[in-house]
Amino acid sequence: MRIVRFVAGKQTRYGVVEDSVVREIEGDIFGKFIVTDRSHSLKRIRFLTPTEPSKIVGVGLNYRDHAEEMRLEAPDEPIIFLKPSSASLPHRGRIIHPKSCRRLDYEAELGIVVKRTARAVPVEKAHRYILGYVCVNDVTARDLQRKDGQWTRAKSFDTFAPFGPWVETDLNLSDALIRALLNGVIRQESNINNLIFEVPHLIHFVSSVMTLYPGDVITTGTPSGIGPMRPGDTIEIEVEGIGRLSNTVVAES
């Protein structure tokens, strides 16, 4: 099931995507809901971020090929960082290239959407806390990351956390391609089975550090092939079984 949050008729709504149609939902996407007969064309809606997270938790160096690309050893435990909720950006939104940034990179990632409040979740129970999965672009000001020696500023500008286009509640985690396409050209391509730390372990690890709330997002790391974006570019993040998240890059005014 694909759960989407959108605007139609100046009202914010939730719906389920069925081919080229969105059918409205009544109820709580984190609990019980029903799918109604009220429908909208997928082409006519304005996408919002699928949830409104209190925080976005990133995981660094979680693909073997990316660790090799960066000439770094695979970590012994997940490396985590935070992106603020103010960085959230929906499908078809515009990524703002800050004036203070000389190199702005894309990072294709699989995102986990939290279903209910989670604290110190055992690995074997992690699946109970997952609403579904999204495509994520962990936008990074690479030059500022290197300058600062830590990641907060480089990862936290407004619009630096596009995710969506919807939440896919059913995804085969054992085998799914992940790609980044810059202006239609594939720049990153890997498989989520190359993750160093898998989804259940990430939920366990992060929830042992901080409480997760419904709608929070954990991004699971990026594969090799990271590279720069420039104003005028279109960047697409694709995860097989979810779909494609598309955003354009614009210069800060």
Image (spheres, rainbow, N blue to C red):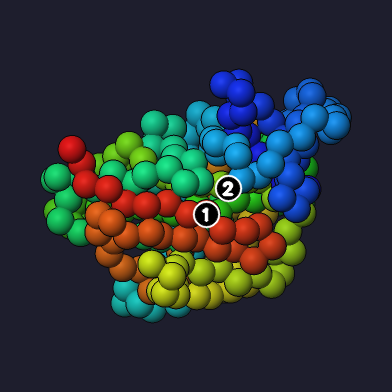
Query: Position of 141 compared to 51: left or right?
Result: left
Query: Quarter of the image holding residue 46?
Result: top right
Q: Residues within 10 Å of mark 1 (few under 14, many from 20)?
A: many
State the residue position of label 2: 165
Nearest the viewer among 131 and 159 is: 159
| Residue where numbered disc 1 is placed | 245
Q: How many marks?
A: 2
Mark toward the start of the polypeptide (1 vs 2): 2
| Vertical order, 88 against 143 (above or below) | above
Return the residue nearer the eye: 120 or 163.
163
Q: Residue at x 40, y 60 (%)?
A: 235
Residue 224 can be seen in this image: no
| Position in image of residue 167 (x %, y %) | 66, 45
Left/right of residue 209 with respect to residue 151 in the rendered view: right
The C terminus sits in image quarter? top left
At label 2, which amino acid type do we have?
A: Pro
Nearer to me, 120 or 102: 102
**Residue kind at label 1, given as amino acid type:** Leu
Residue at horizontal 37 percent and vertical 52 percent from the top: 248
User: Mark 2: which secondary structure?
Assistant: strand
